[in-house]
Image (tube, rainbow, N blue to C red):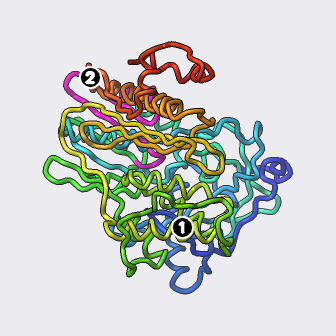
Amino acid sequence: MMKKEDKAEDSGKGMQASATFRINMSDSTGVQITSCLLNGENYLTWSRAMKIALTAKGKLGFVEGRWKWVFKIKQRADGSVDRYKARLVAKGFTQVEGIDFHETFAPVAKLVTVRCLLTVAVARGWEMHQMDVQNTFLHGNLDEEVYMRLPPSFFSRREGMVCCLRKSLYGLRQASRNWYSKFADALRGYGFHQSGADHSLFIYSRGDVFLGVLVYVDDLIVVSNNSAHCASFKKYLHQCFRIKDLGPLKYFLGIEVTRANSSLFLNQKKYALDILTECGMLGSRPSYVPMEQNHGLYVDSGSCLEDASRYKRLIGRLIYLTITIPDLSYLVHVLAQFMQDPRQPHWEAAMRVVRYLKQSPSQGIFIQPNSLDLIAYCDSDWAGCPMTRRSVTGYFIMLGGSPVSWKTKKQTTVSRSSAEAEYRAMAATVSEILWLRSLLSFLGVRIDRPTPLFCDNQAALHIVANPAFRERTKHIERDCHFIREHI
């Protein structure tokens, strides 16, 4: 649908094509290329990828416009090249709210939900499959009227003409929401119900047949107790979208999944080795103690780093590594406090954590088919932060003997006593337990017994068991006292 360019000025202003591309290491699943010269050998490879992308857009009813190209080398779990991907990406920063887009939020699966679903699947002996949606955001229906200019080289251009999008496109502010809405509608049309605890989790339950689908943008985990019905569901998805069936679950969001008999092992070995390689620590001596107890790290410790971005990038990667290595949680919490202005001692402490990875880069979570009982532990220091004197909460929750949820977080207010700090830690843990019980109930897991919560502070336990307002506890916010309603 062609329109005069003057009508597109409001929504398409400033949209220019980018001609140069530079290589930038992106994430655990591929290499993101935001810039490299397309000549010689590279040009032929990327040109084919660009044509594949444009063909996909044509099949999905998309009228292409002039934005910019982004290239990515998609890798397998072992690091080898899976395929070269090219995307025509919209410059969403030029969109005007209320005209070109309205709502933009789209949920993704919580990683705690991923671990819970896999733990339940192992305990119940369910099949676990993985699927990938191709050209994800191009499937979404576009409600707004969005115009853009034509890209060079691939389409004939006419002076003063622009095009109107009929489908959503990568880079549009509302693209992820449009995709999620369409996919959720397709699942509901099949008979799935959506979880209220995590909106990315859907289940289908009819008689003895159970199907569970967890959605993380274009990556899907499918669990089922019926092979025939699972195959029927996959066929339905193929009719609705362009889906790639990856078979049994092996590699999801950078997490390597290994099956051994009826058990499951989750780790991020490739990701950990990538960190060691990037930091030049592959040949270093491993550290068996990741951080000193009295580490003495302060905001103004030592001299400033010349390149603060290296520190920020490393901490970001270590945060992602805590998905399967819970004992990194506190270490990363400490180091992340200095990301605004990292100093040399902070970098040295981070390098020690990296050397700690060297002694066992394949460490992870082992899931066995046990009874699905929840058990929780919580703890807190008192005024542990030397800068703010706020306490740090930590909790660790297991399902069927396997860790599913953990967190280390600084409390929002200063506690006047160690008992108050521990009481606040208990409140945070109880909130997580209630959410987990709701999630497990949706998955069909009956938890008839109370969930044991362990705390090592007798004064805090006394506050929970005795609802009296004393001189040293009367100031504690009411939201913490909800613990008393759940014991």
Classify residue 224 as left or right of residue 170: left
* Quarter of the image with the C terminus in it: top left
Q: Depth check: 418 or 13 in front?
A: 418
**Which residue is depicted at the point 58% across and 69% down?**
345
Residue 198 position within the rendered picture, expressed as x and y whole percent measured from the top left: 45, 33
| Residues packed near mark 2 inside 10 Å, few (<14), some (14 to 19) or many (20 plus) | few
Query: Is 211 included in the stretch rendered in magenta?
Result: yes
Element type where label 1 sits in the image: strand
Q: In the figure, 318 relative to 397: above or below?
A: below
Residue closest to the eye, 205 or 351: 351
Q: Residue at x 45, y 30 (%)?
A: 426
Q: Which mark is residue 446?
A: 2
Work out whether 70 lies above or below 255: below
Q: Which residues are magenta?
A: 190-219
- Closer to the chain start, of discs 1 and 2, is 1
Indicate left or right for 220 with 388 as reference: left
The image position of residue 66, as x and y in percent, is 70, 61
In the picture provided, is 119 more to the left or to the right than 297? left
The three-letter code of the residue at mark 1 reads Gln
Labels 1 and 2 touching (C-beta < 8 A): no
Q: Position of residue 232 (x, y in %)?
A: 26, 38
Please give the name of the residue rendered at 74% of the width and 58% of the height, measured from the top-left corner: 149
Q: Is residue 81 visible?
A: yes
Q: Give the residue at mark 1.
A: 32
Which element type, helix, strand or loop, lies under badge 2?
loop
